[in-house]
Amino acid sequence: MWKDFFYFSKSQRVGIIILIVLIIIVVILNNTLSLFYPEKQTGNSEFISEVENFRKTLVSSDSLRQIEWQQMNEDRRREYESKFEQFQPYSKKTEATKYTLFKFDPNRLDSTGFVKLGLKPYVASNILKYRRKGGAYRTASDFSKVFGIQPEKFQELEAYISISEINDTTLKRNLETTKTIIVELNSADTSLLMQVKGIGRGYAKGIIRFRYQTGGFVSVEQLKEIYGMRPENYEKIKNFCVVNKALVKKININTATVEKLNAHPYLNFYQAKAIYELRRKKGKLNRKEDLIEINDISSENLEKISPYLSFE
């Protein structure tokens, strides 16, 4: 029976023989062609070298891109830190503010004077509220009881307290004069600002917002730029506002990024970019006159932004 499985017709046998011959020819050609056509090692090595160089180029590009991203993130980090410093709570900001000690009468001094002594605006507000209600400080120890004055701060001020004689006339005069409050726009908080007749909560928030965005007020006239400020309102409050330019937060024009410069309301992107390019060209800007050659910045705009620029 097994012969039936291995029986092939004549045509089948011929086909098998031809298949075997073809297999043998293929094997022989595979082993002999390499002798007649040797592999060109030089070409392959050059190709491999080019591939390796191309790969290194890709790595370098990736590295440069990564460096650019790192630089961009570093610039953003510095910008955010600067903004955080600008918007930090007022209590922390005023601690670093310089103040001046001088003799004062707590029954007569206005809010701006208390702030100049180093007291926080809310403390000055508490003092004026107490006086407005008819209260008076008869001794230095009475002044130490003001809410918000720390014992160490009172010890610093105690030697400068000079209280005049108090009588009914004095109390009446205090009631009248405390109604007229003078506020310093770069240090007053919203509660102190709202004590000025004509400044409501909306205007007070607008003043604080403008102060943070620009770095501070350099003139009382900038109140006109507050959103919603009408001419009649400005005329009503301008005489009760003062400005301490020493409190203005300035931008170092020689280190600020384009984003930092563009963040100021008085500069647009093209002006910020032009300042940055001029700085790269000159190396360092030493005075505001160096910006005159920038076509995008007019003389009027330069006068407006220069108080906020530092050339250190």
Image (cartoon, grey):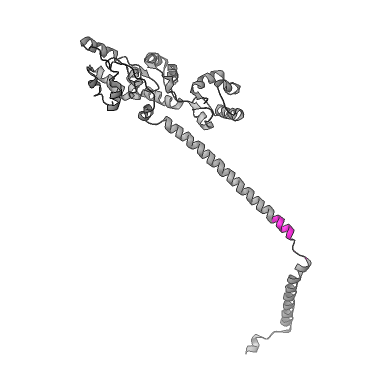
Tell me: 209 left or right of 269. left
Confirm whether the magenta stretch covers residue 126: no
Q: Residue furthest top?
A: 169
Image label count:
0
The image position of residue 277, as x and y in percent, is 59, 29
Q: Quadrant of the N terminus?
A: bottom right
Q: Residue furthest right?
A: 36
Depth check: give the residue in front, 101 or 113: 101
Q: Residue furthest front?
A: 159
Residue at 48% x, 37% y: name it.
Answer: 77
Image: 24 above or below 213: below
Residue at 74% x, 58% y: name it.
Answer: 42
Q: Residue furthest left?
A: 168
Q: Is residue 93 visible?
A: yes
Residue stretch in magenta: 37-47
Tell me: 126 left or right of 78. left
Confirm whether the magenta stretch covers residue 42: yes
Image: 22 above or below 99: below
Tell me: 13 left or right of 309. right
- In the rendered image, which quarter is residue 125 located in? top left
Residue at 71% x, 58% y: name it.
Answer: 44
Q: Is residue 150 visible?
A: no
The image position of residue 74, as x and y in percent, is 51, 38
Query: Chief secondary structure of the magenta span?
Result: helix
Depth check: give the residue in front, 164 or 261: 164
Tell me: 142 left or right of 281. left
- In the rendered image, which quarter is residue 237 located in? top left
The image position of residue 167, as x and y in percent, is 21, 11
Residue at 35% x, 24% y: name it.
Answer: 190
The image position of residue 27, as x and y in percent, is 72, 73
Depth check: give the residue in front, 289 or 10: 289
